[in-house]
Amino acid sequence: QVHLVESGGGLVQAGGSLRLSCVASRDSFSRFDMGWFRQAPGKEREFVAAINWAGGSTYYEDSVKGRFTISRDNDKKTVSLQMNSLKSEDTAVYFCAAAPAGSYYADPNDYEYWGQGTQVTVSS
């Protein structure tokens, strides 16, 4: 079992920045690919970004490319999402998730462990 805890959400004006963090409870964190997903009211959960277990490969949903950056620190068992140039359409609950190394990064069904989510609200 891997327990994930997100932090860093909040209210920000359009064009602003936020940094989300997710801390894992187990030393086996480095064996997992990590992803960030988001879910807006009335919408399905959607892929945002992912990073492989070693941190050498990253993937982004098209609408966040160039604005968001995912990173990880395996020593600190942390994955982060730096979000810049935020838009109102980025408003959602953001979840971090862990998948076995080598999983398909964009499919939420491949992720075994999920955090409780953190709210991001971007005002226009």
Image (cartoon, helix red, strand yellow):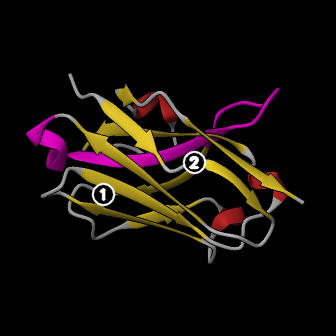
- The magenta-colored residue range is 26-46
Q: On residue 9, which mark appears?
A: 2
Q: Tell me where residue 81 appears, x and y as whole percent.
A: 48, 60
Asked whether, in this view, residue 68 is left or right of residue 73, the answer is right
Closest to the observer: 112 or 83?
83
Question: Crowding at label 2, few (<14), some or many (≥20) Cα neighbours within 10 Å?
Answer: some
Asked whether, in this view, residue 84 is left or right of residue 50, the answer is right
Task: Label 2: state its secondary structure.
Answer: loop
Residue at 65% across, 33% down: 45
Quadrant of residue 115 within the rendered picture: top left
Quarter of the image with the C terminus is bottom right
Residue at 23% across, 55% down: 53
Q: On residue 36, which mark appears?
A: none
Question: Crowding at label 1, few (<14), some or many (≥20) Cα neighbours within 10 Å?
Answer: many
Task: Label 1: state its secondary structure.
Answer: loop
Direction bottom: furthest residue: 66
Closest to the observer: 45 or 13?
13
Quadrant of residue 113 within the rendered picture: top left
Q: Tell me where residue 28 appears, x and y as whole percent.
A: 11, 40
Asked whether, in this view, residue 68 is left or right of residue 113, the answer is right
Residue 105 in sight: no
Instruction: Please give the count of numbered marks on the rendered protein.
Output: 2
Rendered position, 47 above or below 66: above
Q: Is 96 inside the magenta-drawn segment?
A: no
Residue 115 in sight: yes
Q: Amino acid at mark 1?
A: Asn
Marks 2 and 1, how far apart at CA = 23 Å
Q: Tell me where residue 39 appears, x and y as whole percent.
A: 68, 35
Q: Tell me where residue 46 appears, x and y as whole percent.
A: 64, 41
Quarter of the image with the N terminus is top left
Q: On residue 52, which mark appears?
A: 1
Rendered position, 98 above or below 84: above
